Image (spheres, grey):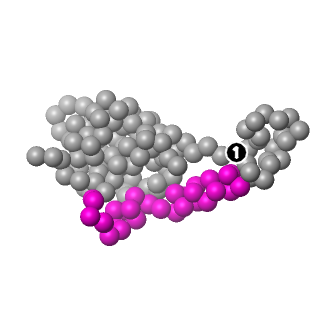
Amino acid sequence: MISQTAEYALRAVACLSRDPGAPMTTQQVADVTRVPMPYLSKVIQSLVRAGIVHSQRGLHGGVSLLHSPESLTVYEVIQAVDPLQRITSCPLGIESHGTQLCPLHRRLDDAMCQVEQAFRQSTIADLMSEPSSSVPFCSEPAA
């Protein structure tokens, strides 16, 4: 449904949302979220370019959220790193179909539309406030 990159971005943002004003090093975020450090660094760069997080080098530096978890949607985080793909024309390139999708592709796009709407309506705060199962969404680093 979503890419691994999008999931890693959501994990990082969820981790940072636990204390939105406090910066964390990329290594700390990687340890907590169990995302490989090199991969996380690239994800963080995309989130910085999208204006979702702020990154500062040096003493007292780190990564922090630029928005409150209540105002940041799941959709915004996903779009920043790996945008959802909608079907706007025939994926098979059949010229006679043009922008008139066949029943299969129309249904697939309708499903993606519903997913997109759900992500637009879900904030990071919503995710963090849901009762957790036996597996935490954002765990503490391994000792």
Mainly helix, strand or loop, the magenta region?
A: helix
Front residue of 140 and 17: 140
Q: Residues within 10 Å of mark 1 (few under 14, many from 20)?
A: some
Could you say whether the residue bearing mark 1 is in a helix, strand or loop? loop
Residue at the image position 68 percent from the left and 56 percent from the top? 110
Please say whether residue 32 is visible from this viewpoint. Answer: yes
In the image, is residue 31 above or below residue 127?
Answer: above
Residue bounds of the magenta highlight: 107-136
Residue at the image position 22 percent from the left and 37 percent from the top? 27
Q: Position of residue 86 (x, y in %)?
A: 65, 46
In the image, is residue 69 above or below residue 26?
Answer: below
Please say whether residue 23 is visible from this viewpoint. Answer: no
Q: Position of residue 24 (x, y in %)?
A: 23, 43
12 within the magenta span: no
Left or right, residue 77 beside residue 27: right
The image quarter in which residue 34 lies: top left
Q: Position of residue 8 (x, y in %)?
A: 38, 43
Residue placed under numbered mark 1 in the picture: 87
Residue at the image position 22 percent from the left and 42 percent from the top? 31
Residue at the image position 40 percent from the left and 58 percent from the top? 124
Front residue of 135 and 81: 135
Q: Farthest residue to the left: give it.
A: 143
Q: Position of residue 85 (x, y in %)?
A: 61, 43
Name the residue type under label 1: Ile
